[in-house]
């Protein structure tokens, strides 16, 4: 789950970078085999169809990946408040039943001040064999490896939410 989390962090930072320039994000599936990383944008007429296709791809693993992450624009409710969020679903196929999902709440650019908020762990299923702190640390290592995304993340971080 460590390498899956690092992959997820890298592409979450990519999503934050994209969202800082424009409102909206094309869903994407990132996958890794060895040192090779690839990303596929999921272009459909409806965003919900793209996300569903991404979830199916994540579950089926047609790329025979070792790790994968589905990244899309969605919402998360925190303390009764619905917030825009980058949703990141990750899989480590070495442990296929393990599933983790993070939400990175953000304030959209259209409000006048793009802001990134603290990530929230939404799902941690069948992950007992993994150290949650190490997985989250790897996520932020991945964020740091995306030069432009990590710069935006750092410059716009608002930990009030």
Image: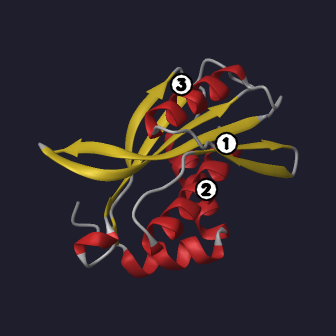
The furthest residue to the front: 45
In what element is the residue under mark 1?
A: helix
* Vertical relation: 148 (above or below) 90: below
Q: Which of these two is toward me, 114 or 153?
A: 114
107 on left or right of 35: left
Q: How many marks?
A: 3
At horizontal 28% and vertical 67% (from top left) the residue drawn is: 159
Q: Quadrant of residue 59?
A: top right
Residue 46 pos. (x, y %): 46, 37
Position of the N terminus by quadrant: top right
The residue wearing badge 2 is 11
Q: CA distance from mark 3 to mark 2?
A: 24 Å
Q: Earlier in the sequence, mark 2 or mark 1?
A: 1
Q: Earlier in the sequence, mark 3 or mark 2?
A: 2
At horizontal 52% and vertical 28% (from top left) the residue drawn is: 52
Q: Quadrant of residue 121?
A: top left
Question: Residue 35, labelled with which disc?
Answer: none
Question: Residue 128, labelled with which disc?
Answer: 3
Residue 22 pos. (x, y %): 44, 69
In what element is the residue under mark 2?
A: helix
Q: Is residue 158 visible?
A: no
The residue wearing badge 1 is 4
At horizontal 56% and vertical 71% (from top left) the residue drawn is: 149
In what element is the residue under mark 3?
A: loop
């Amino acid at each position: 789950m460590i390498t899956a989390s690092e992959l997820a962090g890298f592409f979450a930072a990519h999503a934050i970078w994209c969202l800082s320039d424009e409102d909206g994000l094309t869903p994407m599936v990132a996958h890794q085999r060895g040192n090779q990383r690839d990303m596929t944008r999921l272009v459909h007429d409806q965003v919900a169809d793209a996300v569903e296709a991404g979830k199916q791809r994540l579950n089926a693993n047609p790329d025979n990946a070792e790790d994968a992450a589905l990244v899309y624009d969605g919402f998360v409710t925190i303390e009764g408040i619905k917030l825009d969020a980058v949703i990141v679903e990750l899989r480590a196929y070495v442990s296929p039943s393990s599933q983790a999902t993070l939400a990175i709440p953000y304030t959209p650019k259209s409000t006048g001040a793009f802001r990134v908020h603290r990530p929230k762990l939404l799902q941690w299923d069948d992950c007992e064999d993994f150290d949650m702190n190490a997985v989250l640390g790897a996520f932020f290592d991945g964020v740091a490896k995306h030069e432009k995304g990590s710069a935006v993340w750092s410059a716009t971080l608002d930990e009030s939410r």
